[in-house]
Image (spheres, rainbow, N blue to C red):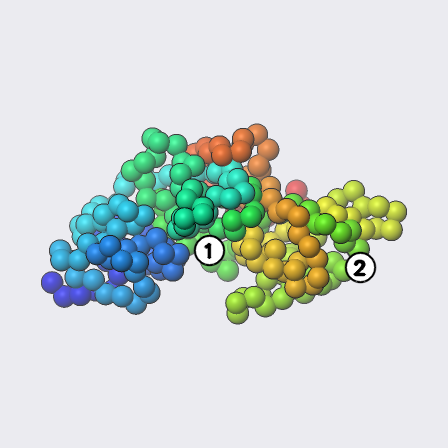
Amino acid sequence: MEPVRLQKFLADAGVCSRRAAEAMIEAGEVAVNGKTAEIGQKVTPGTDRVSIRGKTIGAGTSALTEKVTLLVHKPKGVVCGTPDGRHPETVFDLAPKKYAKQRFLIAGRLDLETDGLVLLTSDGALADRIARASEPVLRRMHVSLKQPFPRNRIAQLLKGVRIEEELVAAEQVFMIRPDADGASTELEVHVTHGRGRGLRELFTNIGCDVRKITCVQIGQLKLSGLPLRGARELSKDEIKLLFRSTRAS
């Protein structure tokens, strides 16, 4: 057989969409013949061995008919991506054992130091939809700072900074229990980029020291009631709530 691009191989195998495949390759989750794959790499179906997080994928593997989306409460120190020697546990390890055969994608990653809500889905189309800038999913982040943040600096967060060629900016910012001068060490920040690391770097770039960041809400789905390290499957109606505006809630 003729070689094909790796993302096409994964899409043809029914694993996920090409865009979702590219995201997994960039995250280092895909290997070819035991070596970490690269974007643009080609494979020969029937000859090369392709695996995702250690699970071998065959050409002609059919997609699982039942798509599953989980809402997970990620602790600090759990990796959204490929584990390393210092941090061997990944967010995929938080999925209940009954979902072991599902090939989950992460829809909106959090960095190592950020805790809170993460979405895992085996539906590549849903992962693509969540990632699209034309239909962003709003996330509410609780940010705790080491020093009081004055209200008159909110404009800096709304303007944002460019990080790795991406503009990272807040959509809305709310002060939590401000003092008499209008400053607070606790903020609620609404973002659509879904990168805890980007939000952390945004504060660092404007001279603020972050103590903690927690994703407390994705769309209309809230963290309250979901224990640390807990996971629950979302219904179709709940998935629709991901795309409903949270601005007025």
Q: Earlier in the sequence, mark 2 or mark 1?
A: 1
Q: How many marks?
A: 2
In this rendering, does residue 211 appear at all? yes
* Percent x, y of residue 42: 23, 65
Label 2 Cα crowd, 10 Å radius (few <14 / some 14-19 / many 20+): few
Q: Residue at x 27, y 58 (%)?
A: 35
Q: Name the residue under label 1.
A: 131
Question: In the image, which disc is placed on residue 85?
Answer: none
Q: Residue 2 appears at what percent x and percent y?
A: 14, 66
Evaluate whether residue 220 shows in this view.
no
Residues 137 and 146: in front is 146
Q: What element carries label 1?
A: helix
- Residue visible at 19% across and 50% down? 58
Horizontal and vertical percent position of residue 74: 51, 40
Q: What's under tag 2, amino acid-wise?
A: Asn
Quadrant in the picture for the C terminus: top right
Locate the N terminus by quadrant. bottom left
Checking the image for residue 152, the label placed there is 2
Q: Where is residue 15 in the image (x, y as percent from the top left)?
A: 28, 49
The residue type indicated by label 1 comes to: Ala
Tag 2 secondary structure: helix
Say which quarter of the image contains residue 41.
Answer: bottom left
Instruction: Pick out the residue farthest to the front.
Output: 85
